[in-house]
Image (tube, grey):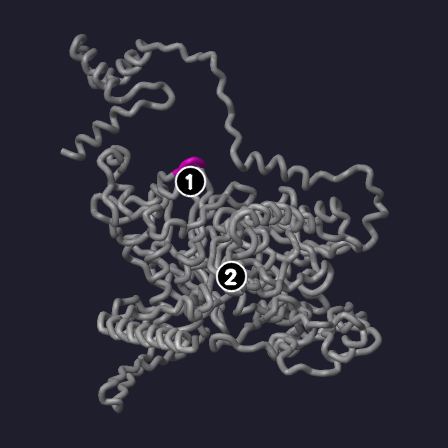
Amino acid sequence: MQLAASFKAFLLKNSTESNQNLYDHLTQLLMKVMAEHPHNAVDVIEDMSRDVKRGLFQDMQSTLRDLPQTTAAELLAEQQCLLFSRPEDRDQEEELVETPLPNVSEIGFNLEQAGVSLGREEMQRIFLALKQLVESQALPRCRLWGKILGTESSYIVAEAECREGEEDGEQSTDEAPEDEDREAETQESEMDPLPESTYKPPPVVPKETTGTGANKFVYYVCNEPGLPWVKLPSVIPEQIIVARQIRKFFTGRLDTPIVSYPPFPGNEANYLRAQIARISASTQVSPQGFYQAGEEEGDEEDEVPRDSYEVNPDFEGIPVTEMVESLSFWVHHVQHILQQGRCTWMNLTVKPGEESNEEGEADEKEEEPDEPEPEVGPPLLTPLSQDAEMFNSPPWSSKLSSTLTSQHAVAVLRSNLWPGAYAYTCGKKFENIYVGWGVKYAGEGYIPPVPPLPQKEYLSGADITETLDPTLEEEQVLQEALEEQQAAQEEMEEAEEEEEEDDD
Amino acid sequence: MDSDSVFFSLELVAGSGNTLSLEQKAALQTSLVILKKNYKFQRVLFWGKILGLKEDYFIAQGRGQDELRDRKYLYSYNCMDWFLLPAATDSMASEVSKAARGRFIGDPSFVYECVEVNRKSEDGAAEDGVVNKVKEETRLSVTVHQIDQEVSVVPRGSFIRNHLGLVIVNRSFTGLSESESRKLDSFFHFREPKNPKQRFVLQNGELNPAVDFLDVLSDDVPKGSWSLQFEFARRVLVLRSLLWLGLTFYHLPRTPQHGYVYFGDGTKNLDLPFML
């Protein structure tokens, strides 16, 4: 019965093109057959059906015109057209000079050999978009950092060196909250003063300036090649510290708030930047010898880590088979991020009375026992064989891209800590890329940090300590004692008065 | 994905970042044809790649008469020599869940060991250690089976169940329209239906029992465990699973092309509720 009902419902559905339904049409057709009783009805039924339809002639021309709906693909295609346009006023000579862009097709081909690819046409579009970025922002150097997948849409990330003399325009946000504080203070002074809280927030670790440490490069992101590139803000050490403790997917919109515990100071753009910084510090590697240490200035103290490196002009490529066998031929070329969230350690404890220079020097010579120890990370250009093993598995896996033609193969290194980070080298060239979800491998399971213990509300002292109420017997005893005391006192006073009277 | 369409379908799923090198693709095309002949499969699919620490496994799937139930898996290191994986049973699954930890190593004869300790605190003396051992081959078989059970995807209308109960490919499937492919309702799990929800009677007018016999993707818990995007210049619909990171399903709207592939390390993402 249910099948019949649902089939009838299906028959009653109106057609989208002619606004008739099959049920009505069949009813009218059979009624016509009943009325006319044609000879050999089964052979002429189709013509009768067409006649019934023609009898219901409706004006097909309506005054409304169809509005063509633009699909998402069409919108994007219009924007991507611009990628392929070539400005006419460019001289041919300019292009022969070294461009800040790397060799596009070669990198794409080598990555495909390694098993990493975003699709050949997509890579081409991405590189054209990079070219557009370089031209619009006049960047000295730029490369494709990779792609971070998100739940609604993904990010394509480009790494660039910023121009010299560029500062972030982030100082204006600090001035606005001050006005609000002043208003709140005036209101409070009119009422009774509330007890002051003795809580001092821990000192904020200052962020590194653009061009050094974790902020060495500037990152631009876009959702699809052809859409405008957005510059990501610089990373603050606090964001890195919190990013280490949370685990979240990206949604694809830069202004999504990150709801997590511990609360992340910022929105998705900041979280993205923090993860990019962590991934770069862990997985950007190069063959040993490609980069050499930069010039070291003046007095060399062991505490200052090297943070500059230069391309070694004498680098002659290491054979691919050796690169695959041992990890000591690969080195990190990005500084390690310390526990503090920065690459260079900064001492936060403020020493009292450090105003005059002489005192300052005296303090530096003395080593106070409660000064925190400076955090030291592995220096730049350390080989990967010194990377720590996590979760009982080596941090890197290496293979050749092909076993059948190994003389032309590419050595591929894959990170096990950040799934999606790859590095390849072939002869004198190498490249790093990350394509993944932007989360670290966390072993068995992720356990969110526990909230801290609640703080004490008020200093416990004698005036708020609770005591038991005295019982009835105690009160009576006390009262008798008081009465005795009073009686004794009265007697003494009477005795004094009597003595005075006697004296008189 | 169907072995006949591997060479162009890999471009469509490459948005997730993984693909096969030219050498591997060429080897696949040759070896899958031989495989189909030897095992007498109706269709052979390239299922995906499981990344291990030392070696990676390439997995292929052969389908028999009934697409849903006759499924066999094979694995290989180099896309040429294929070995049959044992069919996964419940006892194997429970062994694997007790013993296997960490990543795949890359060696099918590697044995995972885990000691289960039963302490008796009253006596203080007896500590029974039951050693659970499982081979990596078993773990591979169970993992592949689980991934297929939990996150394999097909569009609505691509498979039909005929009057004999066999599930076969629908030759007149012309693809989903753009608006239909934006909804998770139009995609099914390709596994024995478990029917968590009862369909409303009003919806029954639209449903066709030959087509709608599988579980719908939008009934998955937690909501949001699928990521639906249009990639490749917004022409291809790509569904990515957030529960098993690495499973990618693609469908080109208004064409019958669809398929799914898994490139990943074979671990379930149990932190999903924290990450959404």
Region in magenta: B174-181
**Image height of B195 relative to B32, above or below:** above
Residue type at the position of mark 2: Val
Question: Could you tell me which quadrant the C terminus of chain A lies in?
Answer: bottom left
Determine the chain carrying the residue at label 2. Answer: A
In-image side of A372 versus B262 (left or right): right
Residue type at the position of mark 1: Ser
Mark 2 — residue?
A439
**Image height of A338 relative to A39, above or below:** below
In the displayed image of the protein, which residue is found farthest to the left? A1
In-image side of B109 versus A35 (left or right): right
Residue B18 shows in this picture = no
What residue sits 59% from the left and 59% below the top?
A: A274
Crowding near the residue tagged with mark 1, few <14, some 14–19, many ≥20 C-alpha atoms within 10 Å: many
What residue sits 76% from the left and 51% below the top?
A: A139
Residue A39 badge: none
Q: Are marks 2 and 1 in contact (CB under 8 Å)?
A: no
What residue sits 43% from the left and 35% below the top?
A: B179
Mark 1 — residue?
B181
Tell me the CA gap for discs 2 and 1.
Answer: 28 Å
**What SS does tag 1 mark?**
helix
Quadrant position of residue A235: bottom right
